[in-house]
Each structure stands twice: as structure tokens, then as C-alpha cells.
Amino acid sequence: MSTRTLQEEITPGGVLVVIRKPPKTLNDAKTILSDLIAAYCRGAVVGESAKTLGYLLTVFVQLSTAADLETRLDKIEKTLTQKGPK
């Protein structure tokens, strides 16, 4: 099994599914999750691997969203501080 974002590696302990390149954007995470779901539906990824990768993607999305909101809030606060009280 090999997709745009996932790679299957045979190891002494069994089959290991790895993400080819870590996500850098929310769109990357969406693409990886889409490939992961498709691979799981085909039976190419076992439940525990899919669960672990899905969890990591969820954490990435949550952190990315929080970082984006923090950046936006900082810009708003800076704008309000520069304008001063009315």
C-alpha cells in the first residue's frame, strides 16, 4: 500500500504505516486523513495504526487552529492598543 501521503514499511515486527511527510498545513492534514480513511476502508491499515495516526492528526489540527486563533487575537489586540481608548 502506498498513497500520496502514506507509506507501508515491512519491519521485523510486522507492517508499519508511516506518514511520508509530516503535515505543515491544515490542508496537508486533511489530505493525510483522507488517505488514511481510504487505506483503512481497503483494509490496508489496521485499526490500531489508523487510530494512532488519526489521533496525531487531530492533535496537529487542534494545535494549528489554536495557533492561528492566537495570531489573529494578537493582531486584534495590537490594533486596539495602537488606536487607544476612545
Image (spheres, grey):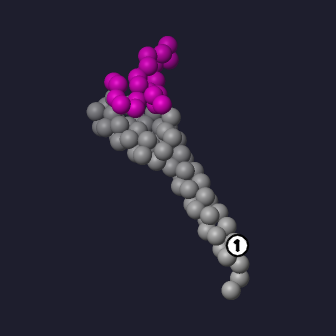
User: Residue extending furthest front?
Assistant: 83
Residue 33's spot in the image, x, y percent?
Answer: 40, 42
**Residue 49 vs residue 80, the one in the foreground:** 80
Q: Measuring 59% from the left and 54% from the top, which residue is drawn there? A: 67
**Residue 32 location, x and y as percent?**
41, 38
**Which of the 4 image quadrants contains residue 20?**
top left
* Residue 13 within the segment the image draws in magenta: yes
> What is the three-letter code of the residue carrying label 1?
Thr
Q: Tell me which segment is drawn in magenta.
A: 1-21
Report if residue 20 lies within the magenta region. yes
Q: Residue at x 38, y 41 (%)?
A: 31
Question: Residue 66 placed where, x, y %?
Answer: 58, 56
Q: Secondary structure at mark 1?
A: helix
**Quadrant assignment, res 73:** bottom right
Where residue 28 sits: x, y (%)?
43, 41
| Front position in the image: 44 or 79 | 79
The residue positioned 53% from the left and 46% from the top of the image is 60
Question: Can you say which quadrant of the picture contains the N terminus?
Answer: top left
Q: Against 11, is 85 above or below?
A: below
Tell me, yes or no, if residue 66 can be seen here.
no
- The answer to whether residue 78 is above or below residue 58 is below
Point out the residue furthest to the left here: 42
Question: Quick check: 66 above or below 2?
Answer: below
Read off the residue under disc 1.
81
User: The C terminus is located in which quarter?
Assistant: bottom right
User: What residue occupies the far bottom of the structure in this picture?
Assistant: 86
Q: Nearer the viewer, residue 30 or 40?
A: 30
